Image: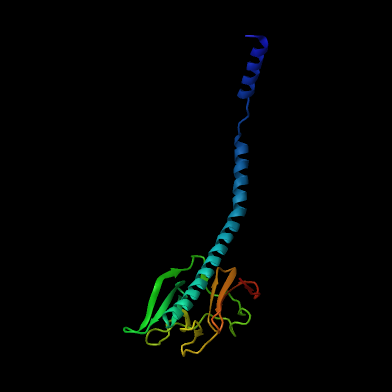
Amino acid sequence: MSASRFTRRRLRAFVEDSSPGFTLVELMAYAAVVVTTAAFLVPFTRSALNSMNLTSDARNVSSATQLAKMRAAADFTKARIYVELAAGTFRVQRWRKVAPVGWVEEGQVAPLSPTVGFGFAGLTTPPPNTQAAIGQAPPCLDNANQPIAATACIIFNSRGVPVDTANTPTANGAFYLSDGATVFAITTSSGGLVRVWRSNTGGATWAAQ
């Protein structure tokens, strides 16, 4: 073996053997950086997930409201979206005109996300050109026309027009959902137009979605 080859092999071995590792102090500093970064990122991640859940739930309630409108027209009867405010669930129901007469389920009961509830988080003004005063839709009635506590309903007649319990067209129906930071509203016009709105809880500036 030549002297130059021997020297190169010894030099390479020395470099490999002398590669630096991580000291305990360096590992502790690295861990501190990771923990500090996570402490900043976790709240933002949680906030983003909450916002996504709220947006998804609002669109699901809007879709259910549209479905109730279409079912009423398709079956030439009444249909409604039935909301349980405290339980945080919603469903579509259809009025059966033949015996046994009454409201029947259309599909399954759908729950809101755990971080979302029905409410408007202290806002005092409804979206523009909708309700006269902010509030959930009127309580649902049972088959004997008695109000059901902690519920809210929007009813559509066979023409797809929202009506009150006296079958009079109304624009007073709305559902409000909130995660504590943002509020979504699903409103109906007297002509049957379903719209979705959004506002921060810190102000009453509604934006159509």
Asked whether the viewer can see residue 150, the reply is no
Please provide percent x and percent y for residue 142.
39, 83
Q: Which residue is outermost to the left? A: 99
Q: Is residue 64 above or below residue 139?
A: above
Front in this rendered view, residue 10 or 2: 2
At horizontal 61% and vertical 34% (from top left) the residue drawn is 23
In this picture, residue 98 sits left or right of residue 71: left
Residue 160 or 197: which is nearer the viewer?
160
Is any part of residue 207 visible from this angle?
yes
**Residue 132, position in %: x, y?**
60, 85
Query: Which of the image's four quarters has the N terminus?
Result: top right
Q: Residue at x 59, y 58 (%)?
A: 43
Name the residue nearer the viewer: 25 or 81. 81
Determine the image quadrant of residue 18: top right
Indicate the quadrant containing the C terminus: top left, top right, bottom left or bottom right: bottom right
- The image's colour scheme reads rainbow
Query: In x, y percent, where is residue 81?
Result: 46, 77
Which of the 4 image quadrants contains residue 141?
bottom left
Q: Is residue 93 above or below residue 42?
A: below
User: In this orientation, which residue lies closer to the viewer: 81 or 140?
Assistant: 81
The residue at 63%/27% (across/down) is 19
Q: Is residue 80 left or right of residue 18?
A: left
Residue 193: which quarter of the image?
A: bottom right
How many marks do you count on the picture? 0
Specify the farthest residue to the right.
4
Say left or right for 84 vs 9.
left
Q: Position of residue 185 (x, y in %)?
A: 57, 75
> Relative to residue 102, is residue 29 depicted above or below?
above
